[in-house]
Amino acid sequence: MERKIPELLAPAGNLEKLKIAITYGADAVYGGVSQFSLRSHSGKEFTYETFQEGVEYAHARGVKVYATVNSFPFENQLPLVEEHLKKLREIGVDGIIVSSLGVLTRARELFPEAELHLSTQANALNHWDYQAYRDLGVKRIISARESSLKDLIKIKEKVPDVEIEIFVHGAICFAYSGRCLISALQFGRNPNKGSCANDCRYPYILYAQNRETGTLLKLEEYPDGTYLLNSKDLALLEHLERILQTGVVDSLKIEGRTKSPYYVGVITGVYRRALEQWRREGKIDTAPLWEEIYTTKNRGLTDGYLVKRPFQRSDTQNLQTPLVEGKKQVHGVVKEDGTSFLCKHTIRPGDILELLLPPGRPSTPVPPVTPTETEIGKIYSDGKNWFLQLNKIVTISGRELGAVHSGYQEPIQLPGYLPPFTFLRK
């Protein structure tokens, strides 16, 4: 029995990440151009030209693209927002993610054929909210991160014609639905306009003051300060079966437009494999998928608030460190030609590199890997995983190197074909 599964929505922080997200199994991607996104840094990695190229690349593979216009603009920015919406219509994006009620209304007027998706930043928490936004033309609501699965089930019963999207993986903002001003206070960088300085990820030191003497006593939990506001990253893999069984979620969203290409590939691939196993078997073997997740950098992992209320949780913060290194180091990524790769970390002759192969999607399968051996090296399997061993390091121009290091710009030859965007790792 084949089961219906939700859309898998992955981050596209730039053109390369967009292509990786699609190759690793995304049904749709989200990203954007300009400062009107809540990730203005990643918005700078796209130009209108490269964003259009990404949209065309996605559409050629049956993948949707949603543009992020989810910041809260000031009065003097409204003409720029309007011009931006017109350009997005020319580019042909499938939907627009908005937070501001005014931007929502203007987007509907200027780009009526686009789907309107309400950002989690708008904090829709109940069926009254969903009904009100539906009546304004919203097709999908990205649920507030404080929403529970029980509430979403009730909301879907009362407002069945609104799609529900939830975050399943990625960074969590310390503030209520991301509405934070800490960065604006400390750095003058407004988080609600896409320029957050990530102040919640810094270590802080507490002091107790004696008002009589003015003496300050430093209170330390850890020697270099305590990460008081540092939320762990969200990971809902363990609850995915339960979410799918309810049938109320229409889209599963992965956070991470500013994260690495490797993160995008691994996490998108993990949830693609989980969804396909559910489609076929009605169950998910999460153990090997967790192993993959832990190869990426993270802040510690939590299942957030979807299955428990915030006041019931005491394990959603990482007080000791802002980031934990992943268990694997990326050494290279295969180029789109499938016959060469770019080095991302030192590789020497004789090195054996594990291959992370993209799973693809049912409609766009990835060609199978064939064992190959040449004088350059070999591609082989141990029955469980695939590996690459290089006997020689030879550039595409034929130059042989004693070693290759991160930052080397000329692609390195492969002994045989590998799917584009395969990661070489140790």
Image (spheres, rainbow, N blue to C red):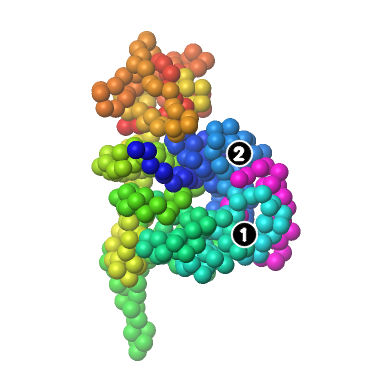
Tell which of 244 and 345 is nearer to you: 244
Question: Outermost residue, bottom direction?
Answer: 212
Pick the quarter of the image with the C terminus. top left
Answer yes or no: is residue 76 visible: yes
| Part of the protein shown in magenta | 68-94
User: Badge 2, how many Cα within 10 Å: few under 14, some, many 20+?
Assistant: many
Tell me the SS state at disc 2. Answer: helix
Q: Is residue 231 above or below residue 240?
A: below
Tell me the SS state at disc 1. Answer: loop
**In the image, residue 367 lies at what x, y percent?**
43, 23
Residue ID for mark 1: 137
**In the image, residue 269 lies at what x, y percent?**
39, 38
Residue at the (37%, 10%) spot, across then down? 375
Q: CA distance from mark 1 to mark 2?
A: 23 Å
Residue at the (47%, 22%) spot, across then down? 338
Q: Is residue 84 magenta?
A: yes
Q: Amino acid at mark 1?
A: Gly
Question: Outermost residue, top direction?
Answer: 375
Pick the quarter of the image with the N terminus. top left
Q: Amino acid at mark 2?
A: Val
Answer yes or no: is residue 262 visible: no
Tell which of 216 and 328 is nearer to you: 328
Residue at the (32%, 28%) spot, across then down? 354
